[in-house]
Image (spheres, rainbow, N blue to C red):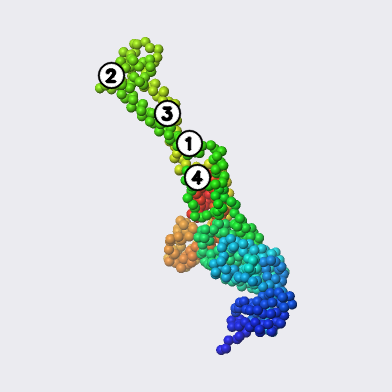
């Protein structure tokens, strides 16, 4: 069977001369791109000497009502829009069996080519995405949903200006389309399509474009569209973690949980492009998932606010510590010297008071006998207004240098192993944890509890109904399996876990239904949980940026706990 050359599958675009003959008002320069659904040519509008792009559909499309309606929709959508980031439309018609659309010519590349050629750096990605947000917000405000946001539809000219092209799947949101959900059948591109595009009878709105934009943002950074279970890019690519927040929120399954406008996405991206400067040192991204080691207490502070603060304090803490250690060593040396001197009789006279020196020397015991701890009885009868020298006088003389010796043992150790935050930093920490704990309880833990309680009630009811069914049928094995499942559910209501499914087919079917429902419930709250986690990490990082080194070490431990703990309820206790 000979293929039909007019069908989209076998479409062969006309030559430049053939197209020029069909469109005499234009000089056709060359073919830009061609596919099963049409072709695009570069040309010049003769009357105005204006470069143009001419898009045509296969000849069969001119006889296909659906194809020509889509093409007309694209022309009408783009004709409504006059914006720096949307190609202008100059003409639309049918000629010689071809539908054609004449629009602004973009001399440059599409984003898919830039991704393939690895030309996109994060800064350029943020800039291009902000411009796309401008175009989308402008279109959405005028009641137009693009419907097919993807890298190949984002054109970039030589000046770095993005043009949002190909409105062939656009939906014009007006009174007719709003009242008739079936008036428009969205198609999109599967890799970037929002989940609601696949739900029959669901009216498409502008938030489907925002989902697709999140997918495109991910691909611009990583080089591949998100598929199945995928890792957000900030950790492997060492990007600002707020990038993950933007992508995750754009790609929420529920439109209500996404950003509600492209302007909100642009604002979030612009904040990433211009992060607040860190205290001291060169500019760095405000959050990293992989934590750097905290500075040692003795390490020098980076340039910035720290040196000025220390200058006002006077002598640095390290100098005080060294001086204190020197005093302790001196005191210990003096005590040791005095102890050695007091143990010899020859030196005993030197250490006593001047008035009693002769008497103690005369009464001293021979070298072979131990020195008495009190003066001999013969000395008690000698009148002397000066109290006799005794061991008690020596500690009294040593008291001034000995007094501080009990205190200086802990200060050198405390900075190396801090256990508490400074009051100011701790107050900030408590405020952050309290705020995010409330958010977690409301949007994660609370919703999980409500939904699991509801599922438990349904599951219990289903088990009771199955019990009645087994009882009427006198199915003893079924009743036994049902009792085992009821006991298991009472112990572990959160799912089967490692328990194998029941051998009874009906009980196993109920178990599978419960497991699927619980997994779906957890999946629904996961984006909110991830968002709260990222916001908490951002806030902690802001506190750490201006905290002393000792506080940074403690905050680092808390930061790591939040990163590695699935349930933040116990971690977020202030």
- Pick whichever of labels 2 and 1 is earlier in the sequence: 1
At 43% from the left and 66% from the top, the residue drawn is 503
* Residue at mark 2 to residue at mark 4: CA–CA distance: 60 Å
- In the image: residue 348, left or right of residue 491: left
Spatial distance from mark 3 to mark 4, Cα to Cα? 33 Å
Q: Position of residue 338 (x, y in %)?
A: 36, 26
Q: Which mark is residue 365?
A: 2
Neighbor class of circle 3 (other Cα within 10 Å; few <14, some 14-19, many 20+) is some
Task: State if disc 2 and disc 3 touch (CB < 8 Å).
Answer: no
Which badge, 2 or 4, is on the more N-terminal residue?
A: 4
In the image, is 61 to the left or to the right of 331? right
Identity of the residue drawn at 64% across and 77% down: 40
Residue holding disc 1: 320
The mark nearer the N terminus, 3 or 4, is 4
Q: Which residue is mark 4?
A: 300
Q: Which residue is mark 3?
A: 402
| Foreground tag (2 vs 4) | 4
Q: Are marks 3 and 4 in contact (CB under 8 Å)?
A: no
Q: State the CA–CA distance, disc 2 to disc 1.
A: 47 Å
Image quadrant where residue 157 sits: bottom right
Report the front residue among 499 and 74.
74
Residue at x 51% of width, y 47% of height: 552
Q: In the image, which is nearer the foreground, mark 1 or mark 3?
A: 1
Q: Position of residue 384 (x, y in %)?
A: 38, 12
356 relative to 294, above or below: above
Q: Nearer the viewer, residue 427 or 295?
A: 295
Residue 57, how many percent across, how many down? 65, 79
Label 4, label 1: how many angstroms apart (C-alpha)? 16 Å
Please name the residue shown 54% across and 45% down the image: 547
From the viewer's perspective, is the residue at label 3 or at label 4 nearer? 4
């Amino acid at each position: 069977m000979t293929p039909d050359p007019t069908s989209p599958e076998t479409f062969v675009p006309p030559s430049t001369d053939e197209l020029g003959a069909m469109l005499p008002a234009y000089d056709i320069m060359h073919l830009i791109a061609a596919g099963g659904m049409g072709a695009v040519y570069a040309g010049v509008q003769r009357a105005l000497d204006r470069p143009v792009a001419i898009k045509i559909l296969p000849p069969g499309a001119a006889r296909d009502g659906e194809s020509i309606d889509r093409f007309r929709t694209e022309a009408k959508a783009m004709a409504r829009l006059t914006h720096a980031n949307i190609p202008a439309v100059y003409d639309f018609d049918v000629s010689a069996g071809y539908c054609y659309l004449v629009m602004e010519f973009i001399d440059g590349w599409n984003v898919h080519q830039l991704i393939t050629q690895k030309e996109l750096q994060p800064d350029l990605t943020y800039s291009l995405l902000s411009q796309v947000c401008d175009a989308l917000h402008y279109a959405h405000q005028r009641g137009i949903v693009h419907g097919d946001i993807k890298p190949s539809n984002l054109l970039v000219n030589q000046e770095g200006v993005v043009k949002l092209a190909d409105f062939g799947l656009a939906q014009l949101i007006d009174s007719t389309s709003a009242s008739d959900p079936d008036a428009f059948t969205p198609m999109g591109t599967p890799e970037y399509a929002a989940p609601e595009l696949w739900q029959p009878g669901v009216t498409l709105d502008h938030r489907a474009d925002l989902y697709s934009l999140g997918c495109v943002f991910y691909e611009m950074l990583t080089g591949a569209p998100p598929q199945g279970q995928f890792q957000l890019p900030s950790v492997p690519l060492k990007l600002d973690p707020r990038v993950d927040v933007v992508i995750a929120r754009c790609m929420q399954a529920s439109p209500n949980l996404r950003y509600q406008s492209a302007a909100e996405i642009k604002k979030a991206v612009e904040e990433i492009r211009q992060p607040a400067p860190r205290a001291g040192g060169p500019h760095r991204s405000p959050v990293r998932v992989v934590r750097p080691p905290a500075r040692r207490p003795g390490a020098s502070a980076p340039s910035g606010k720290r040196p000025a603060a220390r200058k006002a304090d006077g002598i640095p803490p390290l100098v005080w510590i060294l001086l204190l250690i020197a005093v302790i060593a001196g005191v210990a040396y003096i005590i040791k010297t005095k102890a050695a001197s007091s143990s010899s009789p020859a030196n005993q006279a030197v250490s006593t008071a001047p008035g009693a020196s002769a008497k103690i020397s005369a009464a001293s015991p021979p070298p072979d006998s131990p020195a008495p701890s009190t003066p001999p009885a013969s000395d008690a009868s000698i009148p002397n207004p000066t109290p006799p020298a005794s061991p008690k006088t020596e500690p009294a003389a040593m008291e001034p240098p000995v007094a501080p010796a009990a205190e200086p043992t802990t200060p050198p150790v405390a900075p190396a192993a801090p256990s508490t935050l400074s009051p100011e930093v701790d107050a900030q920490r408590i405020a952050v944890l309290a705020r995010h704990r409330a958010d977690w309880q409301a949007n994660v833990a609370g919703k999980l509890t409500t939904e699991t309680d509801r599922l438990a009630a349904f599951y219990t009811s289903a088990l009771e109904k199955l019990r009645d069914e087994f009882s009427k049928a006198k199915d003893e094995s079924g009743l036994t399996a049902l009792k085992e499942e009821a006991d298991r559910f009472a112990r572990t209501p959160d799912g089967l876990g490692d328990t194998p499914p029941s051998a009874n087919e009906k009980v196993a079917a109920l178990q599978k239904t419960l497991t699927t429902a619980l997994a779906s419930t957890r999946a629904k709250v996961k984006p909110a949980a991830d968002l709260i986690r990222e916001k908490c990490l951002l806030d902690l990082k802001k506190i750490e940026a201006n905290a002393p080194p000792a506080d940074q070490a403690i905050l680092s431990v808390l930061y790591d706990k939040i990163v590695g703990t699935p349930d933040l309820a116990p971690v977020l206790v202030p």
